[in-house]
Image (cartoon, helix red, strand yellow):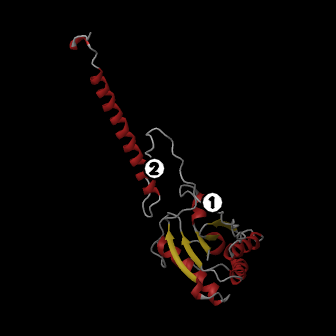
Amino acid sequence: MHKPQYLQPQREGRERWLVSYTDILTLLLILFIAMAAQAIGLSHTPGITAKPAATPPHASTAEPTAPAVEPAPAVEPVRVPTVVPAGDQTLARTADRLKQSGLDLKMEPRGLVISLPQAILFGSGDDRINPSARPMIGEIAEALRESNNKVELAGHADSVPIHNRRFKNNWELSSARGLSLLRVLTSEYGIEQSRLTLTSYGAYRPKGSNDTVDGRAENRRVEILILNP
């Protein structure tokens, strides 16, 4: 006896579902096989390079190593021997020589200063050199002949005003005293005039205080400056 149709299991519908699922799996398998074949073919095709997978943002990437460069051989610095300038050596020898004469010497950056007091060179208010000062001037002239350094003669005076028949002020007196020493050095001791210059400072470059007798005596002087080359 046959069951009613509505009581029989629906086998046909279930079998149709199985067929559709199988078809989908088959299509997916074919798709994957085709994609794999295409990728293999591209990797072996000249001129086509597969791009590497993107590096994750936080992944560390090794930097390319730079080629090793050999360091250049060390160059030793050239050592220059310390040499004292010839001009300084000459001034030092001149100073050592004149110290034995008891002269007032002072080494400055501009050169060697020889200070000659007025009391030794001149009479009061006069520009004529005392005969007793000639030996001292001769020793200075010998020292000057040992070099070709330029020489400056500078006349100085104190601040006490002067006025006599020959000089109206201390400027004229200090200038005349420097000029007298220049004439003796050139005419009597053969020092070249081209090496000498003459300067007058009057009372405006004092060596001591003009308020004392000793200070004013220091200020009345003629300075011989042997210049550095």
Question: With 17 as the anchor, is 208 left or right in this view?
Answer: right
Q: Is residue 217 above or below residue 226?
A: above
Which of label 2 and label 1 is nearer to you? 2
Examine the rendered structure and indicate whether residue 151 appears above or below residue 80.
below
Q: Amino acid at mark 1?
A: Ala
Q: Residues within 10 Å of mark 2 (few under 14, many from 20)?
A: few
Q: Provide the residue designation for mark 1.
A: 68
Please identify the quarter of the rendering in which residue 99 is found. Answer: bottom right
Q: Identify the residue under disc 2.
A: 52
Whichever of callouts 2 and 1 sits on the residue coming sooner in the sequence is: 2
Q: Say whether residue 218 is visible.
A: yes
Kindly indicate whether the residue at mark 1 contacts the one at mark 2 (C-beta within 8 angstroms): no
What residue is drawn where x is 40% and y is 52%?
A: 38
x and y, in percent, of residue 41 in the image: 44, 56
Along the line of sight, the residue nearer the viewer: 199 or 42? 42
Q: CA distance from mark 2 to mark 1?
A: 28 Å
Residue displayed at 54% across by 54% down: 64
Residue type, label 2 = Pro
Q: Position of residue 161 (x, y in %)?
A: 47, 66
